[in-house]
Amino acid sequence: MSRAALLVLADGRFPAGGHAHSGGAEAAVKTGRIRNAEDLAEFCRGRLHTIGLTTAALAAAAAHGHDPLALDEAADARTPSPALRAVSRRLGRQLMRAARATWPGPELAALASARPRGAHQPVVLGLTARSAGLGPEDAA
């Protein structure tokens, strides 16, 4: 496994756009659900134990070699908000562009061809990890 690849994927400067998405924190501030540091910590814990577990599982499954199209459909089913589905696909499309340039491979190319408007970000992340020589735990 290439830990350098893991560090590149985790780096906010990698041109994938994930570093710019707050997971809904701005909306929570706007509606008054986040008013202080304690509220923000609670919001982050909630995201970690809900959507965090789901996205980690999808990324790990993709890195393990499970069917990315089926995983993409599973991500759709597990993301009830149309706005969050659109964001996930946009982030996936951005990651796909950077991943294919950095770690080109047939699995990434096949998913890009099958989902030209973007696959969900955790599925693309898992395939990217796989293309970079990383395992499911790294992807999660």
Image (tube, helix red, strand yellow):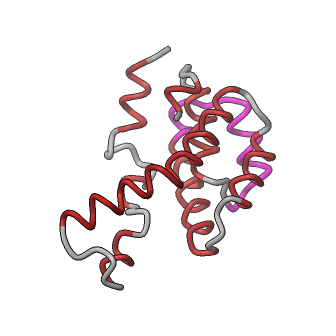
Closer to the camera, 98 or 39? 39
Q: In terms of secondary structure, what is the magenta stretch mainly? A: helix
At a point 53% along the width and 26% down the height, the residue shown is 137
Looking at the image, which residue sits at the far top? Answer: 1
Residue 120, compared with residue 38, is above or below; it is: above
Residue 42, compared with residue 100, is above or below; it is: below
Q: Decide if residue 44 is on the left or right side of residue 16.
A: left
Residue 31 image position (x, y, % from top left): 36, 85
At a point 64% along the width and 30% down the height, the residue shown is 63
| Residue 138 shown in magenta | no
Identify the image quadrant of residue 104: top right
Looking at the image, which residue sits at the far bottom? Answer: 31
At a point 68% along the width and 59% down the height, the residue shown is 78
Q: Which residues are magenta?
A: 99-117
At a point 62% along the width and 66% down the height, the residue shown is 85
Closer to the camera, 62 or 132? 62
Q: Decide if residue 15 is on the left or right side of residue 90.
A: left
Residue 11 image position (x, y, % from top left): 33, 39
Residue 90 image position (x, y, % from top left): 57, 62
Identify the image quadrant of residue 7: top left
| Residue 116 shown in magenta | yes
Q: How many marks?
A: 0
Looking at the image, which residue sits at the far left? Answer: 37
Residue 43, compared with residue 27, is above or below; it is: above
